[in-house]
Image: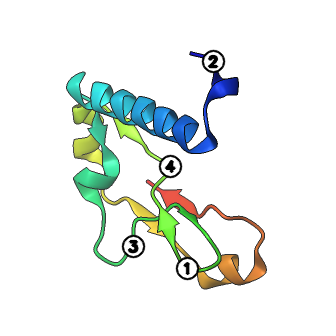
């Protein structure tokens, strides 16, 4: 199969499936997704946003279970100043 013959939508589906499989493999190996493990309720969880106020979780942090137990908080800051300034379409993930 050549990427040249695939539609952009099909290429996106292939990439998303590959990424999802890789994330599942990390969890199967015993790594902890810090967002799932220790996120605060105040954060919306989006690390990438479109200026129309929609967002997705694109940035992940995986650690060993031993290290995860020592962490106090994981937050995603979707500061309105970042959005208004349009300096970046990503936001801070703070561990």
Q: Real-space Cα distance between discs 2 and 3?
A: 38 Å
Q: Real-space Cα distance between discs 4 and 2?
A: 28 Å
Residue 71 rendering spot, x and y as whole percentages: 31, 50
Q: What residue did someone put label 1 on? A: 53
Which numbered disc, 2 or 3, marks the residue closer to the eye?
Answer: 2
Residue sitting at 40 percent across and 65 percent down? Answer: 45
Q: Few, some or many C-alpha atoms within 10 Å of disc 2 (few <14, some 14-19, many ≥20)?
A: few
- Of the numbered discs 3 and 4, the one sitting upstream in the chain is 3
- The residue nearer to you, when weighing 83 against 6, is 6
In the rendered image, the vertical position of residue 60 relative to residue 78, given as above or below? above
- Of the numbered discs 3 and 1, the one sitting upstream in the chain is 3
Q: Real-space Cα distance between discs 1 and 4?
A: 17 Å
Residue 36 rendering spot, x and y as whole percentages: 26, 53
Query: Colour scheme used in the picture?
Result: rainbow
- Of the numbered discs 4 and 2, the one sitting upstream in the chain is 2
- Of the numbered discs 1 and 4, the one sitting upstream in the chain is 1
**SS under mark 2:** loop
Residue sitting at 30 percent across and 69 percent down? Answer: 40
Q: What residue did someone put label 2 on? A: 2
Residue sitting at 51 percent across and 60 percent down? Answer: 47
Q: What residue did someone put label 4 on? A: 59
Which numbered disc, 1 or 4, marks the residue closer to the eye?
Answer: 1
- Give the quadrant of residue 61: top left
**SS under mark 4:** loop
Which numbered disc, 3 or 1, marks the residue closer to the eye?
Answer: 1
**SS under mark 1:** loop
Q: Is residue 61 left or right of residue 69?
A: right
In the rendered image, the vertical position of residue 3 relative to residue 17, given as above or below? above
Q: What residue did someone put label 3 on? A: 44
């Amino acid at each position: 199969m050549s990427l040249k013959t695939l539609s952009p939508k099909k290429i996106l589906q292939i990439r998303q499936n590959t990424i999802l499989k890789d994330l599942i493999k990390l969890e199967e190996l015993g790594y902890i997704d810090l967002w799932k493990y220790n996120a605060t309720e105040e954060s919306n969880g989006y690390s990438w946003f479109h200026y129309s106020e929609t967002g997705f979780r694109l940035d992940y942090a995986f650690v060993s279970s031993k290290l995860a137990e020592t962490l106090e908080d994981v937050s995603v800051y979707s500061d309105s100043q970042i959005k208004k300034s349009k300096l970046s379409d990503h936001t801070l993930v703070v561990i």
